[in-house]
Amino acid sequence: MIHPLVRITFLPTSARRQDTGKRKYADFGHSKHVGLKMDEALLTVINELETKILVFWRSERCYQCLYQLLGVVPAGSSPGQPGSADFSVSTQHEITLQLNSAPEAQEICKVQFHFGEHGNYSLWMKNLNNVSLTNCSLVTNSEPVNSNMPILVAFFVFVGLALIFAVGCRVLRFGVVRGFVLRISGTMETERLINSELGSPRTDGLVTDNILPSPANANRRLRSLDTFRGISLVIMVFVNYGGGRYWFFRHSSWNGLTVADLVFPWFVFIMGTSIALSINSMLRGGASRSSLLKKVIWRSAQLFLIGVFIINPNYCLGPLSIDNLRIPGVLQRLAWSYLVVASLDLLVARGHLDILTTDAWWSPGLDIILYWPAWVCVLLMEIVWLCLTFLLPVPDCPTGYLGPGGIGDMGLHANCTGGAAGYIDRRLLGEQHIYQSPSSKVIYATKMPFDPEGVLGSINSVLMAFLGLQAGKILLHYRDVPTSVISRFLIWGLLLGAISAVLTECSTDKGFIPVNKNLWSLSYVTTLACFAFVLLVLVYYTIDVKKWWSGAPFYYPGMNSILVYVGHEVFEDYFPFRWHMANSQSHAEHLIQNILATSLWVVISYILYRKRIFWKI
């Protein structure tokens, strides 16, 4: 998209120094990095034209967006004295700069470039010998910093620690080394540490989940489930603490996926798996369905109340007020999903599976056929979601709108953020009781409040938990045949992946139903469930089948998930989880702080595990 009378060139630093035609303007484009924040670069626009220039910009992650005004560059005061202006530009994604002449607003040139963090750039605009031909040259005055290097260093540090730990555990198993260490220390504490569960967690008599009671037979516990939960939780804590302030550790602005978008659905998924195993265990232990239903309702209420009154984000604004109390939230969504899926499972679950026939032609589908009433209920809920999403009339918005509003869709639907999902939340809960700073504000400049844990998306969170419940049914029916468990997990992953490919047309923004965490769209659930089944295969095979890995250290926070989640939210702003940084605009400092804070919760969960302290509700 280049104007026919425009020539654009990109010059590196070396070429900039050799460009003798511009040496007389050597003072331009060499400003210090003063005032630059994280994920910003300095751009100096130098205008040799006889008219002032309007500079507009648009992120390439912003789908069908309006250009936003970056600033104005004055015309040159005289020949040899060009006008110039300095701007800070975003470095998170590639951006497009559009330069228009003023006042007629005619496009002069358009430059597409991915600026580097704290880089220094100059954009020169001048007429060539032919007055009708404009040259736009983007010059790199000083190279950007490599902001991703801290992540690489952290990765190698953790890999090194893991290798040292693995080798150390193996070495300490040898009798000669063991005896030598004991002779040096001469303490029983060393003996205990060598024989500790740090590398091989115990399984006797521990809780299956922090929301559910202990199973009747804890010796057959699957460590892979706690490890899966722990992986989800550790990543969740890390991204909630900031993730080093990297954009890919934050939630996607609208459509698409980042690392931060993966973990909550996985947590919902594994909760569903635990529901299947725990309810089956308690029914086998003689518990009545009515008593279990009462416990499910009470635990759901507890989760909901903790989410509303203990870890409500509105505490950032001061004491909670009923006027602006946020009602939806993460624990509230967990409470709803748990209530619905556990209630459905109580209607159809069977306590004794060993008496079921395996000779019938339909026996390979036992894990689905036996529970068909629950499947019908979930499919009906999904039909309700589809009807409300695509058929509900929303005032002043297109029916079936799934966009972010704001400057998206060329600004035509600025106040339609989330379509039916946003409209339902605003009508049922009120604008003051939903999330006021959605991630769509970052790129799409939306002004409407929108809650990613809203009412309509709760239907699809039930679907996610129910797919996890299906994983639990597979484990119950085929637990003694690991190959059957793995094959069924992979089939489900393949099926859900195929559904996602159809719904999204394998694109970020152009499919029938794009992957969208804010909406908890159907394709978001099928995609994340696909990933969950594949990840569960990996941890199940390596931990419970081959026993190559004990699940440490993720096993420990997975055993105390509610405590770790609530604790990390409550103590987020307290030392040692957060402290004053020397340079708050440094990815490295934020990354160090967030990694240490997350690691500290892993250590706390291990200490609680050693002391047999588990918080369940």
Image (cartoon, rainbow, N blue to C red):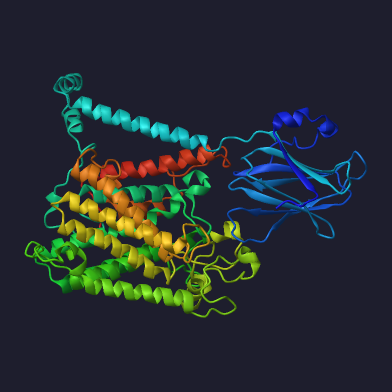
Residue 237 x/y as whole percent:
40, 49
Q: Quadrant of the C terminus?
A: bottom left
Name the residue at 20% across, 45% down: 544
Q: Nearer the viewer, residue 384 or 554?
A: 384
Number of numbered discs: 0
Left or right position of 396 against 256: right
- Is residue 463 shown above or below 125? below
Whether residue 435 is visible to the viewer of this picture, yes or no, is yes
Q: Is residue 422 left or right of residue 213?
A: right
Query: Residue at left 84%, top 49%?
Result: 74
User: Does residue 617 show up?
Assistant: no
Q: In this picture, is 578 found above or below 319?
A: above
Residue 240 point in image, percent of width and height: 44, 51
Residue at the farthest left position: 355
Q: Choose between 155 and 238: the one closer to the eye.
A: 155
Please tell me which residue lies in front, 440 or 470.
470
Q: Is residue 445 above or below residue 413?
A: above
Depth check: give the residue in front, 249 or 601.
249
Residue 37 place in picture, x, y as percent: 63, 44
